[in-house]
Image (cartoon, grey):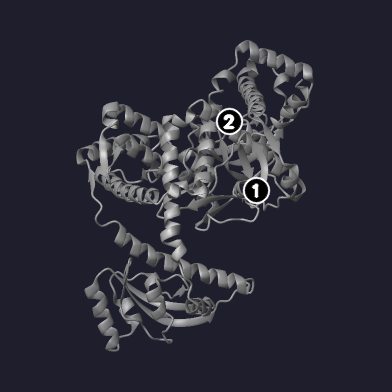
Amino acid sequence: MVKIKISILLVVSFLLTGYVNGQDKEDVVAKVGSQKVTVDEYRERFELTPHVGASDWNIDTTKFEYLCSIIAEKLWGMEAARLGYDTNDVVKYSNASVEKLYVRDALYKEVIADKIELPQKDILKGVYRKGLNLKVNMIISKDSTEIFEIFSALNKGASLDSILAGRPESKEQDTAAIEVSYGQLEEFVEDTVYSLKLGEYTAPFKTKSGWFIFKLVGKYNSVNKNFSQNDIYNSVKKVVSDRQAEILYQKYYRSFFPGHRVEADGLLFWSIADKITKALIEDRKNPDTKKSANIYLTVDDLKSIEKQLGPDTLGMQFIKLEGRVITVKEFLRSLLFDGFYTNVFEPKIIGAKLNSRVKIFIEQELLALEANKKGLQNHPDVKRDIDMWQSNYTSQLLRNTLRDSAKVTDDEVYKYYLEKQKSKAKPTPQVNIVEVLTDSLEVVEKVLNELKQGKDIKDLALEHTKRTWTKKNGGQLGYFPVTMYGELGSTAAKMNVGEVYGPLKLPEGYSVFKLLDKKIAKDSADKPFDEVKEELKKECMVEKFQKLLIDKTVDLANKYGVTINDKVLKELNVTNLNMFTYRYMGFGGRIAAVPLAVPLYDWYTPYMKSKKDLP
């Protein structure tokens, strides 16, 4: 049995301190036309992007190849902007969604994060409690009358154990003591529970989860010897900071939203809900989909819904707020950007979920408008992040236009076959992988989490992969030469059997895959042409597409100009965290912490040669 080694850690970050000035922030690693790749941008993108096979002995090569990929992205992004790709529908709506995320985050920093205070008394209290875990029994009830009757019985001398045992709905977890540590409870509950003496119980507490009574049955020291004083302090500081942030957030929320006038079209809402419901129910009919699985609204679903609604309805006013009109199309595109899914297929339930999303959408639009009124869209760091994402989107769109040019004829495939026969090269290693390919970062997160919990990637592929032709084999692509499928093949070649890697950014989406096997098989050139024609056709198309990408990137580098500061790059210290990170934004929403650059670095050597060959 092969042990699964997940090489990518899923780290969730709340980067409220994103807008800081580093001392080397303006140091330039490379110039690309009129743009710059600063040390700050490069380090952030490198450290928050997975790098398979990277280690101390090859870190300089990894750093250089990644820089070349970022440069290629910027070159293609500049050319895409020149050709007007930034006005493309997909880019326009994606950029608008990204911009709103970042301006809301900047507003959150201004009105909440920057106002957080860390009183010394709260820090000292937290440090004390961090070293002390409690064991408690608790009674939980949704009924206030019942909980106060229980409290009255306790005051009259009844034992908590007898009350728990006598409750009709009593379960094992009701009578078992549970551990409580600092930061787990709401602060007002924690203050009372930590002040209890052994055997004492609290008055009823009302929380978001219902009514509670706690009885203290044990205390013990919980200091981990592997934790330094600094680790403890930082952990306490985060809890105190989060609690302060929640108080400030609730205060701002209550003061900001009242008074805003918003209108939404109910008839259009139910028309949208009806079509989304039908699309999701249709998706669920897929025989490979498990009955309990979440079904996500896909790009194809959206295209179908938009076609059904027609251009006139898509352009109609769905929501009006603060003088701004939100069309049906704009709202639908926001659903795709943020993701929408369900595992319950009752029309009323889906309608309720959609109604909740409309409410959140309106709140976030109002917050984005407030941020823009304050001019936060012009903050240098906000502009940098927005430009970085726009370049990432448009460069991918432009690169994908080369795919039609990469198609090959039967004559080209046969010529390729003859060349392989003549070359007498060593057989190309082959790999077999199981892959989940998706457009959704939510699916990526779900897959990585479930893999960590021991779920079989084949089951996840059946449920989620958009590479439909692999589903009949449980997500397996079958053995293929590592020269096929571009970066997917070359990345798999660097892995050990049993390892899982991802997400890898491919032109067609995000890929999470497991290497099942490697082998040196009989070379395709040693077999009859008719037997290997289809395999060679795929291989030939990949090579042709890669050559077109490299040649075009060289042309763009000559057109716009590229300069790499080798000294700055070599001296730049980076940590190879080898992880995929989300950035959770202020006032809700999330995005990959940085855009995942599609690997493209083989252009640099021919580019340098082309410069020497110029007269």
Q: Residue 474: tell me if it is visible.
A: no
- Residue at the location (71% across, 39% down)? 564
Q: Position of residue 132 (x, y in %)?
A: 52, 79
Q: Determine whether 477 is above or below 222 in the image.
A: above
In depth, the one of 63 and 165 nearer the eye is 63
Give the residue type at disc 1. Answer: Val
Residue at the spot of label 1: 39
Give the residue type at disc 2. Answer: Trp
Quadrant of the rendered image containing residue 263: top left
Q: Position of residue 325 (x, y in %)?
A: 28, 39
Dot 1 falls on a residue whose secondary structure is: helix
In depth, the one of 92 and 371 nearer the eye is 371
- Distance from Cα at disc 2 to Cα at disc 1: 21 Å
Q: Position of residue 536 (x, y in %)?
A: 64, 20
- Residue at the location (30% across, 36% down)? 327
- Image quarter where the C terminus lies is top right
Q: Residue 456: tell me if it is visible.
A: yes
Dot 2 falls on a residue whose secondary structure is: helix
In contact (CB < 8 Å): disc 2 and disc 1: no
Quadrant of the rendered image containing residue 21: bottom right
Residue at the spot of label 2: 76
- Residue at the location (64% across, 26% down)? 559
Indicate which label's residue lies in the foreground, 2 or 1: 1
Q: Residues within 10 Å of mark 1 (few under 14, many from 20)?
A: many
